[in-house]
Image (cartoon, rainbow, N blue to C red):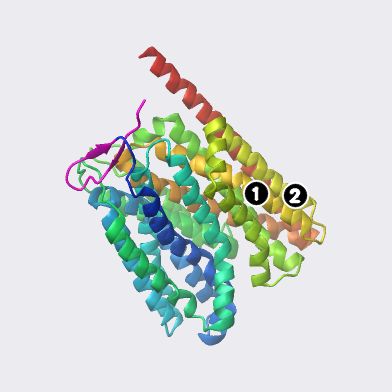
Amino acid sequence: MISYTVYGMSTSPQIRPQGHPRRWLILGVICLAQLTVLLDNTVLNVAIPSLTRELGATTSDIQWMINAYSLVQSGLLLTAGSAADRYGRKKMLIAGLALFGIGSLTAGLAGSTGQLIAARAGMGVGGALLLTTTLAVAMQIFTTEEQPKAIGIWAAVNALGFAAGPLLGGFMLNHFWWGAIFLVNLPVVALGLIAVVALVPESRNPRGDRPDLLGALLSTIGMGALVFAIISGPGHGWTSGRVLGTAAVAVLVLGAFAYWEARIPYPMLDPHFFRDRRFTGAVAGAVLITFGMGGALFLLTQHLQLVLGYGPLEAGVRTAPLALTVVALNFSGLSAKWAARLGTPVSIALGMVLMAGGLVSIALLDSGGYAGTLMGLLLIGGGCAVANPAMAHAVMSAIPPEKAGVGAGVNGTLAEFGNGLGVAVLGAVLSSRVPSAGLAAGLQTGQLVGAVAVLLGGFVAAALLRRAERAHSGVVVAQ
């Protein structure tokens, strides 16, 4: 059976029996664009003392500097993916790079906390466009057989961004003023723009669906309100009027979004996707997995600094084995080979077992030293390398190729939602345990709760995907 990939659909569909001839070079270009966005998810954390001192930033200002970026980005992911499908993924990739570059320049030269917060919000708009279009383009230019390896490399860049953010931030702050952590994005953005214009083919939904403006508005408001409620919970209390009111708005608006999408001929997010067991399995598993991992890795940074006594840069160095393991296994193609042999359900289950084992190692084997943490990081890295690309591929392959942007938006939204919820809930577990049992015991409890969530998520996703595969094979045989 020959697999076909559709690309270059700006005028008329071109279906080739092979992927794009420059697909690996293009993947390098879009991964470079992706890396700039991911670095800015974590790079600001190490600059907090400098911002407090030089801009007179309050605790509230710092929270908004960090959250403005993630709040805008997570709220716009579905809308950005839909826009890429309709108007062209290359166009949206260029727009995302340009907006991210302008935001970085404004942030680097900001003279007040208000200017920096606004610039970070603008960077979030660019980040949403980049996160959705990079994965969507990768799905278009590679054949079906090559997609798992390509997604593995894409996922490895995610891990690299997680590890490199604090390291890059620490290095820049040791040699330059705080604005340099944003201005360093500019040459990368310029290089990315030139490469995208020269190399990346245009692709979009050939059907030309009408724009779903109301759906875009509802999804942006609903997701933004939901993430805001999750972010506000630990600081203001889960039963506070601010959190409950925002959560109520999120539920009402997202309910209206679901109602609207089910009743229009050109929905941004087709409700029929949820009838595909591959899609629902991947969605359910991804939320539980990112919940456990996002919260547990948040606790890990606290563990390294507050229990083991490392500084921010030292802590960043000591988390590097996780990312390096992911990078090594995915760039070498080993994880893609294992996934091909084991199948998606078993790969996800195995990866989650390794991740959960790593979290347990950090919680139980690290009695004041780094050895248990190192073992845990290596296990988590191996699990991420196997499971995360399989999960992303399960989400993307359950959605028609012409909706690749929306699929990438769903994948990104799940990651943002799960990570935010994990940080909030496991942070609350930590806060509730510290007064009675102490910091170290609170961190241990949070890590173990995260391990249970990861393990549960892996088994839920694997079971649902296994059932979907059996149902699909039954339909094929019947036909």
Q: Is residue 427 visible?
A: no
Q: Residue at x 28, y 37 (%)?
A: 16
**Which residue occupies the foreground of this view, 296 or 265?**
296
The vertical placement of 118 against 234, above or below, is below
Chain-order first, disc 2 or disc 1: 2
Q: Quadrant of the N terminus?
A: top left
The amino acid at mark 1 is Ile
Instruction: State the image quarter where residue 220 is shown.
Output: bottom left
Magenta segment includes 6: yes
SS category of the residue bearing label 1? helix
Residue, disc 1: 380
Q: Position of residue 36 (x, y in %)?
A: 44, 64
Q: Position of residue 446 (x, y in %)?
A: 69, 53
Instruction: State the image quarter where residue 165 is shown.
Output: bottom right
> Badges 2 and 1: C-beta atoms under 8 Å apart?
no
SS category of the residue bearing label 2? helix
The disc at residue 289 is: none
Q: Residues within 10 Å of mark 1 (few under 14, many from 20)?
A: many
The residue range painted magenta reads 1-16
The amino acid at mark 2 is Ser
Magenta segment includes 469: no
Q: Residue at x 52, y 33 (%)?
A: 340
Q: Position of residue 98 (x, y in %)?
A: 32, 67
Q: Quadrant of the C terminus?
A: top left
Residue, disc 2: 361
- The overriding secondary structure of the stretch rendered in magenta is loop
The extreme top residue here reads 478
Q: Residues within 10 Å of mark 2 (few under 14, many from 20)?
A: many
